[in-house]
Image (spheres, rainbow, N blue to C red):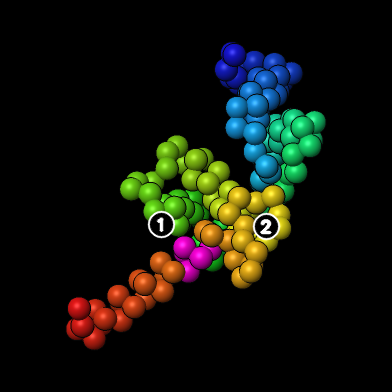
């Protein structure tokens, strides 16, 4: 499979994406795809390219009957950091903490992709095609882990503040 470069024609670049996503879908057979909803007020030419690539991915999933969930960048930022205006550093930091990674994911776009997956897993809820969905409490496994980690960190902080060990 030939890689895509800016020098390639649009049709050639979209074909590389189509072939790559078809291979990926075959190799990993996901239950659902989460895709970032394209939005920009400033750079229309960039938005068009991303929208075209997203369309190829969404169509590939649709051909296989795989549901596609769209999440805006603000939704993703808010889900993982608590602020829809968070910067890339904040998103990367929170993804690293949520997933308990030893170091930040690289390249930077990897953190964005993981944030999108976390957002979908957390927001999809029970009964969805989301991995990690639970039934009784309505919270995903990832949300429970995060809530437990936050509670533990709060207790440790309180112990330290009071001089307890």
The residue under label 2 is 124
Q: Residues within 10 Å of mark 2 (few under 14, many from 20)?
A: some
Splitting the image into 4 quarters, where does residue 60 fall?
top right
Residue 34 appearing in the image: yes
Tag 2 and tag 1, C-beta contact below 8 Å: no
Q: Residue furthest top?
A: 2
CA–CA distance in space, label 2 to label 1: 21 Å
| Residue visible at 59% across and 13% down in the picture | 2
The foreground one among 47 and 100 is 100
Residue at 67% over, 20% down: 19
- What is the magenta range? 143-147
Question: SS for tag 2?
Answer: helix
User: Can you say whether 128 is above or below 60 in the image?
Assistant: below
Question: Circle 1: is it few (<14), some (14-19), or many (20+) Cα within 10 Å?
Answer: some
Which circle's residue, 2 or 1, is located before the other in the chain?
1
**What residue is disc 1 on?**
97
Residue closer to the observer: 129 or 98: 129
Main secondary structure found in the magenta portion: helix
Image quarter hosting the N terminus: top right
Give the numbered dot on residue 137: none
Q: Where is residue 87 shown, x and y percent of the image? A: 50, 55
Q: Where's residue 131, x and y in %?
A: 61, 50
> Closer to the camera: disc 2 or disc 1?
2
């Amino acid at each position: 499979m030939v890689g895509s470069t800016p020098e390639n024609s649009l049709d050639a670049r979209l074909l590389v994406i189509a072939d790559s996503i078809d291979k990926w879908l075959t190799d990993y057979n996901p239950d659902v795809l989460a895709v970032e909803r394209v939005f920009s007020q400033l750079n229309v030419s960039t938005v068009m390219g991303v929208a075209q690539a997203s369309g190829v991915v969404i169509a590939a999933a649709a051909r296989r009957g795989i549901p596609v969930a769209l999440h805006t960048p603000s939704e993703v930022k808010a889900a993982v950091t608590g602020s829809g205006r968070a910067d890339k550093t904040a998103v990367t930091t929170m993804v690293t903490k949520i997933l308990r990674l030893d170091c930040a994911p690289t390249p930077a776009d990897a953190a964005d992709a993981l944030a999108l997956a976390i957002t979908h897993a957390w927001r999809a809820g029970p009964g969805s095609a989301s991995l990690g969905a639970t039934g009784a409490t309505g919270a995903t496994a990832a949300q429970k882990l995060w809530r437990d980690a936050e509670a533990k960190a709060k207790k440790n902080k309180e112990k330290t503040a009071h001089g307890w060990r």
